[in-house]
Amino acid sequence: MGKKMLEVRDLKTKYITRFHEDVYAVDGVSFSIEEGKSLGIAGESGCGKSTLALSMMGYYFPPLHYISGDIIIDGQNISGMNPDDVRKSILGREIAYIPQAAMNALNPTQRIIRFVEDVIRAHDPKADKKEIRELAEARFAELGLPPTVLNRHAVELSGGMKQRTVIAVSTILNPKVLIADEPSSALDVTSQKMVIKMMRELMEKGYIKSMLFITHELPLLYNVTDDIMVMYAGQIVEKGTAKEMVFDPVHPYSHGLMGSILVPEEGTRGHKLTAIPGTPPNLKRPPKGCRFADRCKYATDECRYYTIPEKSFENDRMYRCLKRVDELKEVYSHE
Ligand SMILES: Nc1ncnc2c1ncn2[C@@H]1O[C@H](COP(=O)(O)OP(=O)(O)O)[C@@H](O)[C@H]1O
Ligand SMILES: [Mg+2]
């Protein structure tokens, strides 16, 4: 086993709404990523992916609140750390986070070099302007971005270029963990490919030591990350290698996200997705039994009302369902 870059243990966080209601958006999530590895997180909108990303940074402010659990980055437990210390010594340097739609949040009146200065000066207030520029130019060139981009304003860049710029700037301090929330979702297919290629380059060149890639499209992760977890209603319902999860999903929710059986030789090309009927549950009042039961074709009353599925394991695969893998495969084979 390689060295663990990130370990999350039984993390629970919630939103407290204006009406003082609790929304349990991350409800007992555990996983780890080793050095040099990438992990995908997939699930429909509203399943808690972005909240998990925010929660993993240990940087909480209302309405998001920490409940319990550990976040360990390269051996350092950051849960319970003072938010100011997290901002100064962890964010950007140990763990970098690219929020959903980050590229649209760039201040349009600032030149790109100013964002680089901000990231570097957050940790080293006296950093020299000339050295920052040299570092940025070298990194941009290495990642296939023209260094002239540094003199441009965000509004002058195309969507794909803006997103690649955000990624290059966010990782300038070589973080141990990069969390990218839907980094390719708003882009055309060509730009998507370039963004994914760049993230892999960052890993290969060792500028980032591990990566979490969040998306609502499970098939997109094939050939992008080593492993995949599927998240539903604040919990991880299945985890396995990317190949297993895409070609041989076990949990009925993962199976539903894939839509239909794939042919391994053809990859996910031309694969049509069919939406799963219904919507994820309201996390103010999570369902009593299995959280997916009311949308699951195979659910029984046992699943709906009586037994909460704990984690089951089949070799290295984790899944949260009352049924056995062979039972599930049997039903899938008749579809
Ligand atoms: N600021 C907030 N206040 C209260 N509830 C929120 C807030 N942001 C998100 N939620 C709720 O938390 C749940 C998870 O949301 P989110 O993490 O954004 O999911 P995803 O990224 O998978 O689409 C949803 O039920 C959503 O309505
Ligand atoms: Mg999200």
Image (spheres, rainbow, N blue to C red):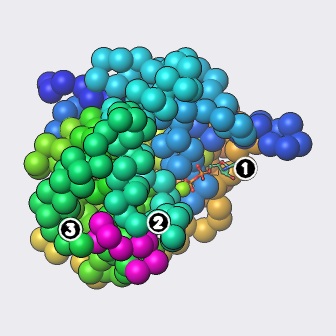
Q: Which mark is residue 282?
A: 1
Q: Whole-percent x and y of residue 88?
A: 45, 29
Number of the front mark, 2 or 1? 2
Disc 1 vs disc 3: Cβ atoms closer than 8 Å?
no
Q: Name the image quarter holding the N terminus.
A: top left
User: Which type of secondary structure does the marked residue at label 1 adopt?
Assistant: loop
Tell me the magenta residue range.
Answer: 149-156
Cα distance between the residues tagged 3 and 2: 16 Å
Q: Looking at the image, which residue is at 10% across and 48% down?
A: 205
Image vertical order of residue 128 relative to residue 31, above or below: below
Viewer-nearest residue: 40 or 134: 134
**Residue 75 visible here:** yes
Q: Residues within 10 Å of mark 3 (few under 14, many from 20)?
A: some
3 or 2: tag closer to the N-terminus: 2
User: Which type of secondary structure does the marked residue at label 3 adopt?
Assistant: helix
2 or 1: tag closer to the N-terminus: 2
